[in-house]
Image (tube, grey):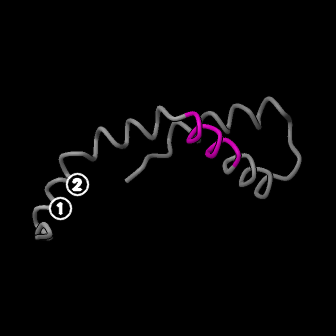
Amino acid sequence: MPLSESTVSKLADALKADIVQEIYDSEKYYDFMTELIGEALEKKLGNCDQDLFFDLGLCLMDRIELK
C-alpha cells in the first residue's frame, strides 16, 4: 500500500535539512555551481578583472540557497 500524500510530505520535511547538507557537501554541487555562476557572471559582465570575477563568484556562491 502506498504512503499517503501527507505522510510523504512529513517525511520530506523531516529529511530536508540532512538532504540539503548532503548536497552542499558534495563536490559535484560545488563544481556545478562554480560553472553556472561563472557562466552567468561572464554573460552579465563580459570579460572583467579575474580577481573581481573570483570574488563575486565566491560571494554569490555563499548567497545562493536551496529552497
Return the x and y of residue 3 as percentages of the image width and height.
13, 66
Residues at circles 2 and 1 in contact by the CB criterion of under 8 Å: yes
Which percent across, then down, holds residue 63? 50, 41
Residue 40, above or below 20:
below
Check disc 1 and report the residue beneath it.
9
| Residue type at numbered disc 1 | Ser
Q: Is 63 placed left or right of 42 in the picture?
A: left
Above or below for 43 versus 61: below
Stretch of the chain drawn in magenta: 27-35
* Residues at marks 2 and 1, CA–CA distance in whole angstroms: 5 Å
Q: Please tell me whether residue 34 belongs to the stretch shown in magenta.
A: yes
What residue occupies the far right of the structure in this picture? 47
Q: Position of residue 65 (x, y in %)?
A: 44, 46
Element under disc 2: helix
Residue at the spot 69% in from the left edge and 31% down from the top edge: 55
Above/below status of 18 relative to 13 = above
Residue identifier under label 2 = 12
Residue 66 on the magenta segment: no
- Given residues 55 and 21, the one toward you in this image is 21
